[in-house]
Image (cartoon, rainbow, N blue to C red):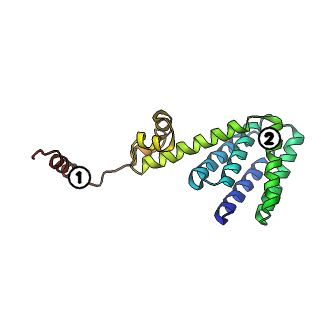
C-alpha cells in the first residue's frame, strides 16, 4: 500500500472513531460528511483500498440508525483495531478487521453491494465535474466518465464548475480565426 493512501485511510478511520466514540444525534450527519469526503478520494486515487474504506464508511453511515448496541460496540472496537493495525503496517490484520467490519454491517443491512454502486457513481460524478472545471463540455465529461449528461449537470450546477472556465483568447481574435478557417473575411 502506498504511504499516502495509508495515511489517508488512517485519517479517515481516526475521524470515524472520533464520531462514533460517543453515540449521539449528530453522528449521522458527521458520518455523511466524512463519507462524502472519502468519495472524493476514490475519484482522486482510484485505489482498491481507498474504495473499500469509502464503501465501509458509507455503509456505516447507512446502517447507523438501525445498528444494535452490541454490534455498535463491536464496530467501534474493529475500527479502532483496524486503525492500529494500519498505523503499524500490519496489513494482513488490517484486512481481517475490514472483513469483520463488513460482516457486522451486513447483519443490519445486506445492501453493501448497492452502497458500492452508490460510491462509484458519486465518484464518477465528482471526477466528471473536475473535467468540466478543466474546460471540457458537460457532454464530453459525462461521456468519459460513463454518465448521462443529466447526472453530471445536476451535480455540476450545484458547484462552481460551470462558471469556472475563462477564455484566454479575446473574442475578436477567436472571431478572426473562425472567419479565416471558414474562408470568410473581416
Under circle 2, the secondary element is: helix
Q: Is residue 30 visible?
A: yes
Q: In this image, 88 relative to 115: left or right?
A: right
Determine which of the numbered discs, if any, sits on residue 45 in the image.
none
Residue at point 42% right, 40% down? 138
- Counting from the top left corner in percent of width and height, residue 114 is at 68, 36
- Counting from the top left corner in percent of width and height, residue 152 is at 49, 38
Residue 3 picture quarter: bottom right
Q: Quadrant of the N terminus?
A: bottom right
Instruction: Give the residue furthest to the right.
Output: 70
Q: Is residue 11 above or below residue 21?
A: below
Residue at point 90% right, 41% down? 70
Q: In this image, 184 relative to 170: left or right?
A: left
Determine which of the numbered discs, if any, sits on residue 105 in the image.
2
User: Disc 1 marks which residue?
Assistant: 170
In front: label 1 or label 2: 2
Residue at point 79% right, 57% down? 94
Q: Is residue 101 above or below residue 1?
A: above
* Dot placed on the residue nearer the N-terminal end, 1 or 2: 2
Q: Are marks 1 and 2 in contact (CB under 8 Å)?
A: no
Q: Is residue 21 visible?
A: no
Calculate the distance from the C-alpha at mark 1 to the C-alpha at mark 2: 56 Å
Instruction: Give the residue furthest to the left.
Output: 185
Amino acid at each position: 500500500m502506498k504511504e499516502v493512501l495509508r495515511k489517508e485511510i488512517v485519517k479517515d478511520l481516526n475521524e470515524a472513531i472520533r464520531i462514533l466514540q460517543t453515540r449521539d444525534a449528530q453522528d449521522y450527519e458527521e458520518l455523511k460528511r466524512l463519507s462524502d469526503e472519502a468519495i472524493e478520494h476514490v475519484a482522486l486515487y482510484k485505489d482498491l483500498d481507498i474504495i473499500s474504506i469509502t464503501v465501509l464508511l458509507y455503509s456505516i453511515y447507512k446502517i447507523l440508525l438501525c445498528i444494535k448496541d452490541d454490534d455498535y460496540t463491536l464496530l467501534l472496537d474493529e475500527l479502532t483495531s483496524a486503525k492500529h493495525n494500519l498505523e503499524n503496517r500490519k496489513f494482513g490484520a488490517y484486512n481481517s478487521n475490514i472483513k469483520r467490519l463488513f460482516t457486522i454491517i451486513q447483519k443490519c443491512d445486506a445492501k453493501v453491494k448497492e452502497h458500492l454502486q452508490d460510491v462509484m457513481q458519486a465518484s464518477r460524478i465528482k471526477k466528471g465535474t473536475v473535467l468540466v472545471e478543466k474546460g471540457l463540455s458537460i457532454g464530453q465529461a459525462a461521456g468519459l466518465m460513463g454518465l448521462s449528461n443529466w447526472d453530471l449537470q445536476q451535480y455540476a450546477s450545484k458547484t462552481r464548475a460551470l462558471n469556472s472556465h475563462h477564455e484566454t483568447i479575446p473574442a475578436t481574435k477567436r472571431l478572426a480565426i473562425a472567419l479565416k478557417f471558414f474562408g470568410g473575411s473581416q
